[in-house]
Amino acid sequence: MADLIDTHAHLDSDRFEADLAEVLSRAVAAGVRVMVAVGITAASSQRCVDLGSTYPFLHPTVGIHPNEITEALAGDWERIVSLASSPRVVGVGETGLDRYWDRTPFSIQEEWFIRHLELGRRLDRAVVIHCREAETDTLRVLKDQFEKHGPIRGVMHSFAGLWPFADACLGMGLHVSFSGMLTYKNAADLRAVAGRVPEDRIMVETDSPYLSPHPLRGKRNEPANVVHTATSLAEVRNVTLERVADVTSRNARELFRLS
Ligand SMILES: [Zn+2]
């Protein structure tokens, strides 16, 4: 079958430290030969960049996750800015807004989200956006940026909303990426959304080590499992798995400008 691209995996996580080489070979064996390694702190972003030098098929992004901001040290943002301009880095983030965990005061999350959007625009990198229980605020920030600066090059990752949110994101130029949540038994609404996203804007991801797809829920997730999400996407869109692999990989290559 055609190759898949896992557009969002936290491969620098401690949970992969002991067996990353095996995890990556299982991915390659499953047809997942390209992955985007997403940073969440300055140290994690540095590790993603280092992983990208070790494994040329891993493409790093750099950023500070909204839930990690209060742990950030002086100088961490400057490290992100300097890492972001390295030619191997394909994206800025994971950034965004999170009202579920509420670990960082919301006004600070917003300020850092805007910083990441500005950095992505300045360096012409895709922005990787996280949104958890904060759709209204996320749209408000994105709309303001969109009205000032035009289409936003980026992805709403692990999409979990309804169609109006997807439609608004698409209208501002964003891609939409689906994770293992798409395979959950109670995710009929999400599958309906995934059936409607235009073919040139849709992508798949694992968000490893989190969000294992059905029937692996509860276990550590890994990039090889993106096949489950792609299979579910093929079913809801009534196309072949090969077609899903072709279009999602092409979209990922274009958005992140993968070589
Ligand atoms: Zn993530």
Image (cartoon, grey):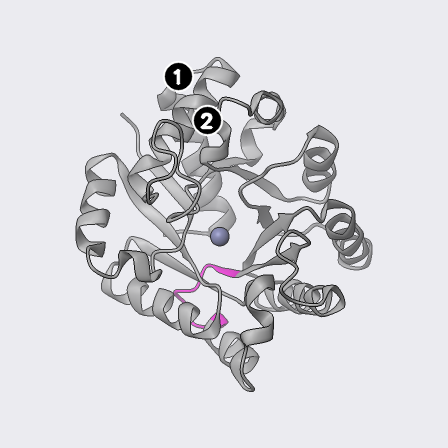
Q: Residue at x 61, y 21 (%)?
A: 192
Tell me: is circle 2 under 8 Å from ligand 1: no
In the image: residue 183, left or right of residue 172 = left
In the image, farthest residue toward the bottom: 74
Q: Amino acid at mark 2?
A: Thr
Q: How many marks?
A: 2
**Placement of 74 over or under 14, stated as above or below:** below
Instruction: Identify the element where label 1 is drawn.
Output: loop
Amino acid type indicated by mark 1: Thr
The image position of residue 162, as x and y in percent, is 68, 31
Residue span colored magenta: 84-92
Query: Residue 108 magenta-drawn?
Result: no
Secondary structure character of the magenta stretch overall: loop
Would you name the residue on which mark 2 appears?
183
Q: Which residue is mark 1?
A: 240
Q: CA distance from mark 1 to mark 2?
A: 16 Å
Mark 1 against mark 2, which lies toward the viewer? Answer: 2
Quarter of the image where one finds residue 105:
bottom right
Where disc 2 sits, the SS reads helix
Q: Position of residue 218 (x, y in %)?
A: 38, 39
The answer to whether residue 85 is magenta is yes
